[in-house]
Amino acid sequence: MTRSTRQVLGPVAVTATAALMLAGCGQSAANDSADQESRNPDQLVFAAVPSEESTSLQQSYQSVIDMLEEETGKKITFQHATDYAAIIEGQRTGKVDIAQYGPFSYVLARSSGVGTTPVGAQVEEQGAEPGYQSYAITKPGSGITKLADMRGKKVCFVDPNSTSGYLYPSAGLIEAGLNPEQDIEEVMTGGHDASALAVASGQCEAGFAFDDMVDVTLPGKGQLKKGDLEVIWKSETIAGSPAAIADDLDPALRKTITDAFQEKANVDYLRENGFCDKDCSVGEEGSWGYTDVDDAFYDGVREVCEITDDEQCQA
């Protein structure tokens, strides 16, 4: 007998219920925005969600925020969001002007009617293609060597709105012949670090997290050492996480913000113009900066939505 359960680990974990409510809300903000007066507020809100439990999220974006303040002439307030559902709702209600999304949460925002447009995606180095992978992980010797072996196991995910921590893993499980809602015991941890560490500590028998968290971030902090985890599956390359701005902002302001992200939100410009020092990086994962992307860049995420037929993909 299989079972379908969803547990949460830790205070920052989220539930699918809130996300589903958001996904089903109202008319299209993108369509409505043309009939509304554009906004040109004195203060803008920049929101992001941490990929790990962190008190330095704002600091990782501070150089970009300082640059945007100079470019726009406006005060920019940073909002440390607890989950992607909060950012989606914030942009829906006009309380978030600039949002750092994950690919899935961006697609979900658009499909549920939020008027928002990507202005750039983070890359590790200049000229690189923005993208990353989801890893399936387990402890060595667990007996789990492929996704199909997760049947009946307790499996850690990140967030119902996470691209590499839920959507792509779900597609992988389906392609392996499993129904994620029935054939495994889902555990939502609220962070990529929490998912990986829960597997390493034995709280989950397997789990998912994005590549750099497993390969770089946690080992670099001494929280994982070689041999703690085994990677048994890697997803296809996922389109990089976009920054997106509200469609109802004043057109001239939107152009200023867009140009700033695409031309100046990178370590070369930020360092040369005194916004950061020689250790400068952009965002939580220490990226070089942003490169231009458009909405069509995220069609691969939409295709994975079709594979999973996940309720959250439905507007």
Image (cartoon, helix red, strand yellow):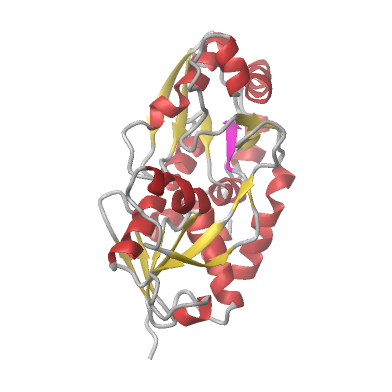
Number of dots carrying numbers: 0
Name the residue nearer the viewer: 125 or 203.
125
- Determine whether, in the image, residue 174 is placed left or right of residue 43: right
Name the residue nearer the viewer: 187 or 54.
54
Image vertical order of residue 71 relative to residue 106, above or below: above
Quarter of the picture containing the C terminus is bottom right
Image vertical order of residue 69 relative to residue 159, above or below: above
Q: Which residues are magenta?
A: 241-245
Main secondary-structure element of the magenta-colored stretch: strand
Residue at left offset 57%, top offset 75%: 174
Residue ranking furthest to the bottom: 1
Q: Residue 66: percent from the left, percent from the top?
A: 49, 15
Name the residue nearer the viewer: 115 or 166.
166
Residue ranking furthest to the left: 11
Image vertical order of residue 263 relative to residue 118, above or below: above
- Residue 2 position by quadrant: bottom left
- Residue 115 position by quadrant: top right
Residue at left offset 40%, top offset 57%: 226
Is residue 97 in view from this perspective? yes
- Determine whether, in the image, residue 176 is placed left or right of residue 45: right
Name the residue nearer the viewer: 201 or 247.
201
Q: Residue 220: percent from the left, percent from the top?
A: 40, 43
Image vertical order of residue 4 relative to residue 260, above or below: below
- Residue 120 position by quadrant: top right
Is residue 312 in view from this perspective? no
The reply to whether the magenta stretch includes residue 149 is no
Residue at left offset 42%, top offset 55%: 159
Residue at left offset 52%, top offset 81%: 148
Q: Residue 164: percent from the left, percent from the top?
A: 53, 56
Quarter of the picture containing the N terminus is bottom left
